[in-house]
Image: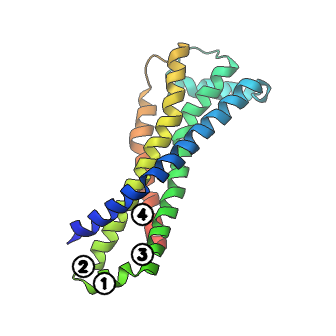
Amino acid sequence: MISGIVRAYVIRLKKNLRSIITSSLAYGIGITVLIITVGVFFPQLYTPATQYALETLAIKILSIHNHVLPKYALAVVAIAIFMPFLATIITSLVASSTISSTFNEDRYEGVFEVLFSSPVSVRDIIISLLIYTLLASLIVEGLVMTSTAGISLYLLYLMGYLNRLGTYYLELVTILVPSLTFSSVLISLVITL
């Protein structure tokens, strides 16, 4: 019975996919353009301490071995390093808004009355909501990460500063960020219910 509920939420996800993709790309590209614009046109914002911190993070996280980076490259390094964390925050906001809006839509449209009168358990409904929100959040996270960190890493590669990614960065992007997304989805589900 759970597969029918999950299928219904996947159909809803397909209907909302265009707005999810549009907003995710807008977040990602907007943040990337803003940070690069500020870094290129206002390089005086990088104090020596900020420049040293970004260069140190570039060495430790991205395995960039050039100790003196030009200020325009520092903006790209900042995006590459800090975007996984910003993507997690954006994804957490999307998860909480997705699950609360879905829950409210279902409550006002009478979907829950139909589900509770059918032979579906509450556990199946909660698992379906969890899967729906987790899928939507992972789509947003993937698009935001690709449109920000992916673009900045590619720019660093084109500039000749990045030959390979550091292990820490790969762990950050593949393990830490999705686990934080999953925990934010769980927390959002508990708060909504």
Q: Nearer the viewer, residue 103 or 152?
A: 103
Q: Residues within 10 Å of mark 2 (few under 14, many from 20)?
A: some
For the residues marked 2 and 1, what is the alpha-carbon distance in whole angstroms? 7 Å
Q: Give the residue drawn at x 46%, y 73%.
A: 105
Could you tell me if residue 50 is visible in this image? no
Placement of the N terminus among the 4 image quadrants: bottom left
Query: Which residue is under mark 2?
Result: 120
Foreground mark, 3 or 2, reads 3
* Image x and y of residue 132, in percent: 36, 61
Query: Which residue is under mark 1?
Result: 116
Residue 76 circle label = none
Query: Which residue is under mark 3?
Result: 106
Marked residue nearer the N-terminal end (1 or 4)? 1
* Image x and y of residue 137, in percent: 43, 53
Q: Is residue 79 shown above or below 22?
A: above
Tell me the colour scheme of the image. rainbow
- Most distant residue in the right direction: 44
Q: Is residue 53 shown above or below 156?
A: below
* Residue 76 located left or right of residue 100: right
Marked residue nearer the N-terminal end (4 or 3)? 3
Marked residue nearer the N-terminal end (2 or 4)? 2
Asked if the residue at tag 3 contacts the one at tag 1, i.e. Cβ–Cβ closer than 8 Å, the answer is no
For the residues marked 2 and 4, what is the alpha-carbon distance in whole angstroms? 21 Å
For the residues marked 1 and 3, what is the alpha-carbon distance in whole angstroms? 12 Å
Could you tell me if residue 19 is visible in this image? yes
Q: Residues within 10 Å of mark 4 (few under 14, many from 20)?
A: some
Q: Amino acid at mark 1?
A: Phe
Q: Secondary structure at mark 4?
A: helix
Query: Which residue is under mark 4?
Result: 186
Q: Amino acid at mark 4?
A: Leu
* Residue 25 located left or right of residue 67: left
Marked residue nearer the N-terminal end (1 or 3)? 3
